[in-house]
Image (cartoon, rainbow, N blue to C red):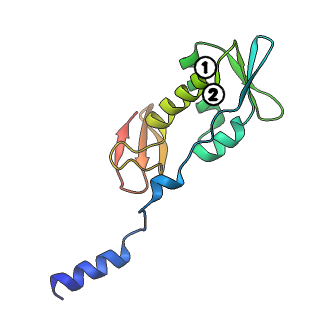
């Protein structure tokens, strides 16, 4: 088998990840103030899109915003304090950069793995493993 035939065969067998970046969009946080609490209305939709555990995302929001939070019976996040939509969106973008997007290939096809009490990001698309 010559080089061209091998290349053709390899190209047929590779996973189709072209355009994967464009399919990944995090919904804009829908937040509203309710007294001294900020209600993140579409938190569950955001979790579904990120493919991450609610406790992991909520803990990150709490740490970055310097507040406490809980999930109500409707799946909304209730953040103690008043936070504008832009601030919540900036923290969410930081979460995506750190815990969702692969630092090697830029795709969102990652999983969080815990190894020796340390979190690592494993990319299903390119196989990279990186510390977070």
Residue at position x 70%, y 32% from top?
30
Residue 28 coordinates in the image, percent (x, y) = 63, 37
What's the mark number on residue 58?
A: 2
Residue ID for mark 1: 62
Q: Is residue 16 left or right of residue 53?
A: left
Please determine whether, in this image, residue 29 is positioned above or below residue 84: below
Q: Is residue 91 left or right of residue 130?
A: right
The furthest residue to the right:
73
Front residue of 27 and 98: 27
- When asked about the image quadrant of residue 101, the answer is top left
The furthest residue to the bottom:
1
Please determine whether, in this image, residue 92 is positioned above or below residue 113: above
Q: Is residue 69 left or right of residue 116?
A: right
Tags 2 and 1 in contact by the CB under 8 Å rule?
A: yes
Residue 16 coordinates in the image, percent (x, y) = 43, 68
- Marks 2 and 1 sit apart, C-alpha to C-alpha, by 6 Å
Residue at position x 54%, y 19% from top?
64
Front residue of 111 and 33: 33
The furthest residue to the left:
2
State the SS at label 2.
helix
Please determine whether, in this image, residue 120 is positioned above or below residue 34: below
Q: The N terminus is located in which quarter?
A: bottom left
The crowding category of the residue bearing disc 1, from other C-alpha atoms within 10 Å (few below 14, some 14 to 19, many at least 20), is some
What's the mark number on residue 103?
A: none
Q: Is residue 124 left or right of residue 36?
A: left
Please determine whether, in this image, residue 122 is positioned above or below residue 36: below
């Amino acid at each position: 088998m010559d080089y061209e035939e091998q290349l053709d065969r390899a190209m047929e067998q590779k996973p189709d990840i072209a355009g994967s970046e464009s399919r990944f969009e995090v919904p804009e946080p829908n937040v509203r103030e309710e007294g001294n609490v900020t209600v993140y209305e579409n938190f569950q939709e955001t979790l579904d899109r990120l493919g991450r555990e609610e406790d992991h995302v909520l803990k990150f929001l709490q740490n970055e915003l310097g507040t406490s939070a809980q999930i109500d019976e409707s799946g909304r996040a209730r953040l103690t304090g008043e936070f504008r939509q832009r601030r919540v969106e900036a923290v969410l973008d930081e979460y995506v950069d750190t815990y969702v997007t692969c630092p090697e290939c830029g795709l969102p096809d990652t999983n969080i793995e815990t190894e020796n009490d340390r979190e690592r990001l494993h990319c299903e698309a390119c196989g990279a493993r990186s510390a977070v």
